[in-house]
Amino acid sequence: MALTLNEICHWIDQTALSQAIQVTKWAVPTVQTIHILAIAVVASSALMIDLRLIGVFWADRPMKEVTSRFLPLVWWPLLILLATGILMIIAEPARSLKNPAFQIKMLLLIGALIVTGLFQFLQRRNASFGDLRSGPRAAAATVAIVSMLLWSSIIFAGRWIAYFA
């Protein structure tokens, strides 16, 4: 028998961890602050790569150098975002899981991860991908624009979670 979303939220809400987070006044703001800082690292690193792809940032440097510097700062903080995101869901499961803004944010996040993975795949397959002089410019610019739109939308959707609660 499958549980409904309401039942899942109620079950999570009744766990000891959820109760502990709810009664500890500083827990949620601390977790949210860490989450926001990790988002800033991910989004700014992705932005640096995207701006390089369209030739606005570090246009004189090889794409490989830019990705070596910034791509780890896209992937590693995602672990922090996962941990803090799970803690925020545990703290207030219904506020998150039943929230349309949260659901949209998760769909956008899946899209952003796919685009970032696609970029990495294309660059590994074609070392000149993203290089301004020799690589496929239209594809690189498209990946960059889609990536910027997705990460910006994720930030907006995350901010709107508070207003749909």
Image (cartoon, grey):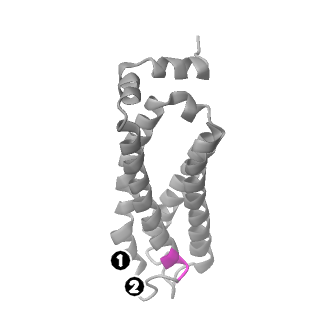
Is residue 135 rendered magenta in the image? Answer: no
Query: Which region shows up in magenta?
Result: 51-55
Q: Is residue 31 left or right of residue 10?
A: left
Q: How many marks?
A: 2
Picture coordinates of residue 72, whole percent (x, y): 35, 61
Task: Tell me the residue at 50%/64% (across/down).
Answer: 119
- Identify whether 8 is placed above or below 147: above
| Residue ID at (57%, 61%) | 152
Quadrant of the rendering where the C terminus is positioned: top right
Q: Nearer the viewer, residue 95 or 50?
A: 95
Is there a contact, CB below 8 Å, between mark 1 and mark 2?
yes
Residue 65's tag is 1
Judging by the rendered image, the residue that carries numbered circle 2 is 61
Q: Position of residue 112 (x, y in %)?
A: 54, 55
Secondary structure character of the magenta stretch overall:
helix
Task: Indicate the position of residue 97 as horizontal and vertical percent values.
Answer: 57, 32
